[in-house]
Amino acid sequence: MTSVSELMETMEYGPSVEDSAAARDWLARRGAFGHFIGGVFTEPGALFDTRDPATGEVLAQVTQGTAEDVAAAVAAARQAQPGWAALSGTQRARYLYALARHVQKRERFLSVLETLDNGKPIRESRDIDVPLVARHFYHHAGWAELRDSTLPGHQPIGVCGQIIPWNFPLLMLAWKIAPALAAGNTVVLKPAEYTPLTALAFAEICQEIGLPAGVVNIVTGDGNTGAALVAAEVDKIAFTGSTEVGRAIAGQLAGRGKRLTLELGGKSPFVVMPDADLDAAVEGVVDSIWFNGGQVCCAGSRILVAEAVADRFETLLNARMARLRVGPPLDKSTDVGAIVDPVQKDRILSICKAATDAGAELVGGAPGDGCFIAPGYLRNITPANPGFEQEIFGPIATLSTFRTADEAVELANNTRYGLAASVWSESAAVATDIAARIKAGVVWINCANVFDAAAPFGGYRESGFGREGGRTGMLDYLAEAPVDAAEEPAPAAPVSATTGAGQPADLDRTAKLYIGGVQKRPDGGASYAVPGGLAPLGSRKDIRNAVEAAAKAGKWAAMGGHARAQVLYYIAENLSARAAEFAARTSGAEVEAAIARAFHYAAWADKFDGANVQAKPGHLLNVVNEPYGVMGISCPNAQPLAAFMSLVMPAIAMGNRVVVIAAQDDPLTVTDLYQVFDTSDLPGGVVNIVTGPRDDLAKTLAAHDEVAAMWMVGGDLAAVERAAGGNLKPVWAPAHRDWTGRPAQGETFLRHATQTKTIWLPYGALPEGTGSAAY
C-alpha cells in the first residue's frame, strides 16, 4: 500500500469516481424511450442504441423519429401555441422559473447522465453545463416578464423547430428552448442521435412543473429526423451543427418564408501577443481547446503566438499538456474525457494524418483504447495545411507564429469561419485593437470559452448568422411589428435598345452605372428603354466590379458615426437643394421622403449603440453593433427614389458599403443621385448603383463571396436565398410598402444592417472561487 509520505512525493491523484447509480436506476426504470409529444411520452417505435463513449456500454434504447412523428409533434406545438402566447409575461416567467429550479434540484442526476451519454468529464458537466442550463432559464424568465415593455410591438413567431448537437446536449437545449418559450413560441426539438438522454430527462421536468401540453415536444432520431423537421410546417428553424449541414438547411428553406438561425462550425484563433502573461495564456489554451475534449465549435483551435515568445510559450504548453489527465469521465480527477463516438474519433485521427502528411508535426495527440485521444497540437503548419483549414473538433490544436500585429490579424482572419477568437495581451490598447479587427462574433480578451445567458453568441461568415442569448437572441425568436404590405408591380423584361427610342427630344442624355464613385458604362455596352430615356443594362461583370469597389472602401466604417452622420446630413442638404429637379422625375412626396431618410439615419449614425451587459462577475461584457461590410440591396420596382433611400441610408449609416440594384423599370432618378453623392463628400465605393434585370443581378450579387449580407424587396427571393447559401450570408426580405411613410424607417432597418460582436474583458478582481470553472 502506498504510504502518505510517498503520496506527498508524487502528488498523484487517486480515483474519485462519481456515483452513477441514480442515473442508471432511472435508465433501467424507463426502459426504451418514446418521443415526448403533446405533454406525454409516446410508445417506443423502431429503436437505436445510445452508448457510453467511455466504455461502449449500451445505456438505453431510443426511438428513431419518422416524418409522421415530427408531423405529430408539430401539430401538438401548433395547437398549444396560441394558448401559450396568450399567457401574460408573468405567467410564462413562472414556468421558466420552475424549469430553472427543477434543473437545480436534479443537478447531480443531470450531470452524471450527461457525462454517461456524452463522455465529457464530470467536472465540466457538474460545474459548467448544468449551472449554465439553470442560468439560461432564470435569465429568460426575466425576458418573458419584460418582453412587452422592453420589446414593444414584437410578437411570437409561432412554432420553432430546433436541432441541437452532441457536444453540449442539455446546454444547447436550454440555449434554444428558453428564449423560444420566453418569447411566446412553442418548440419541437430534436436532440443529437448520440446524446438524447438529458433531453428526455428534461421532458420529465416539463411534466413535473405542469408545463402546458405541446409547448415543448422532443423527437429523437438521426439526421433523417432532423431533415423531416426542416421540411415540416414550422415557422422557424434554429440549428447548431456543422457548416455543411447548415448550408443544406439554408438551401432547403430558400423561398419558404421561414425564419432561420444557424450556429455553425469554427476554426477560432487564439492570439498570444509578445507582452502576454504566458502562464495565463497556457491556462487559456487548456480552457479553450482541451475543454470538452476540443469538441467545442468556438474552441481556440488555431494558436497564433508572437515569434518573440514562441519558444517559451511552447515549453510551458508542453509542460502543462503533460499533466492533463485523460481517463474515465466520471472520475473527478479527469481533465479530458472520451470522444463522443468512434466515428468522430476516426475523423479526428484522419485529419491529423492528412496534416502530418502535408508536413506538420503532431506533438501529443496519441489515440488511446476506445474513444480516447490525448491532448495535442500540430506545429510547423502552414495556412494551406488541412489541419489549419479544417475544423478538427477534437483535442488537437495548431500552433504557428507571427511577427507583427497586422500579420496576427491576417492569420486570424484567414478562414471561412468567424465564430470566436481569444486575444492575450497585458496591454488593453493592443488587445482591444486586435479584437476590433478580428472578424468573429465573440472575442475573449485574456480569457477563453466564457459563456453566459446574457451574452449573445453566434458567428460571422460561414459560422452562421443569428444570435442566441441576451436581448439579441430574444429578437431572433420574435417577429417584428407588422407593416401594411403593398403589392409590388412586376417589372417588364428589359429589352436591349438598338436605337434612341425613349430619349427626350430636347437633350440626348446618357445614364451610366455608378461604381467606385465614378460613372461607368455597362460592361456589355448595352442600354434598355425606361421612362425618360435609356438605362444601362448591367451584367454579372458590372456586379463584380461594383463589389470590388465596395470592398476597397473599408475606411468608411473606420470614420466613425459622427463623420458618417455629417456626410448623410450633407446628402440631405444637397438633395433638398435639387428637390424640384428630382420631383419632376418622381414626385414631391418621394423627394421629401428621401430627404427625411437621410436626416433620420444621420441622426442614428452615432446613436445605434451596443450595450454593456451584466454577466459573470470579474468581466466587462460589451455587445457591439458592427457593420457587415459589403451589403447587397435589391430595390422594389416602385417608388424608385424613396425605396432606394429607405434601404441605402440605414445600411451606410452603420458603416456598410452597398451595391444597389435600382428599380428595374424606372431607375433614372436613382442614377442621377451620383451628383448628390459626389458633392456630399461620400467616399467612392460606399454606394454603387447597377441597373438592369433585377432578379438576375440580385442572384449574382447574393452569390458573391465578398458580399456579407443581402436585402431584397420583391422578386425571386427563393433564387436569391439559394445563391446566398453558398457562403451562408443572411438575407432580409422586408415587405414592399409605402416607402414615403414612417414604417419605411426605424431601428428594424438598423438591426438588419449590423451584426453583434460580443467582447469579454477582465474587469476588477474575480471573486474567490470564480476563476476557471473547469480547471
Image: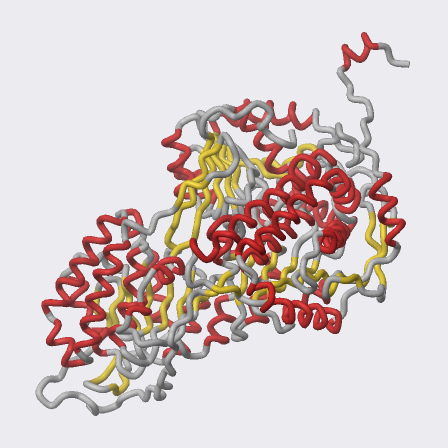
Residue 343 position in % (x across, y down): 76, 52
Residue 139 position in % (x across, y down): 55, 46
Left or right side of 630 for 148: right
Quadrant showing the C terminus: top right
Q: Is residue 543 above or below residue 5?
A: below
Q: Is residue 277 above or below residue 393?
A: above
What colour scheme does the image use? secondary structure
Q: Is residue 408 above or below residue 535?
A: above
Please name whichever residue, 395 or 774, is drawn nearer the observer in this view of the structure. Answer: 774
Residue at the extreme right of the image, as rendered: 1
Residue 206 position in % (x across, y down): 71, 54
Please name whichever residue, 259 or 656, is drawn nearer the observer in this view of the structure. Answer: 259
- The quadrant holding residue 181 is bottom right
Residue at x-position 70% and y-position 36%: 126
Q: Is residue 204 above or below residue 368?
A: below
Residue at x-position 82% and y-position 31%: 17
Left or right side of 221 for 292: left
Residue at the extreme top of the image, as rendered: 5
Residue 415 visible to an observer of this rendering: no
Left or right side of 170 for 518: left
Residue 719 visible to an observer of this rendering: yes
Please name whichever residue, 709 or 533, is drawn nearer the observer in this view of the structure. Answer: 709
Quadrant showing the N terminus: top right
Residue at x-position 68% and y-position 36%: 124
Residue 317 position in % (x across, y down): 61, 27
Residue at x-position 81% and y-position 65%: 42
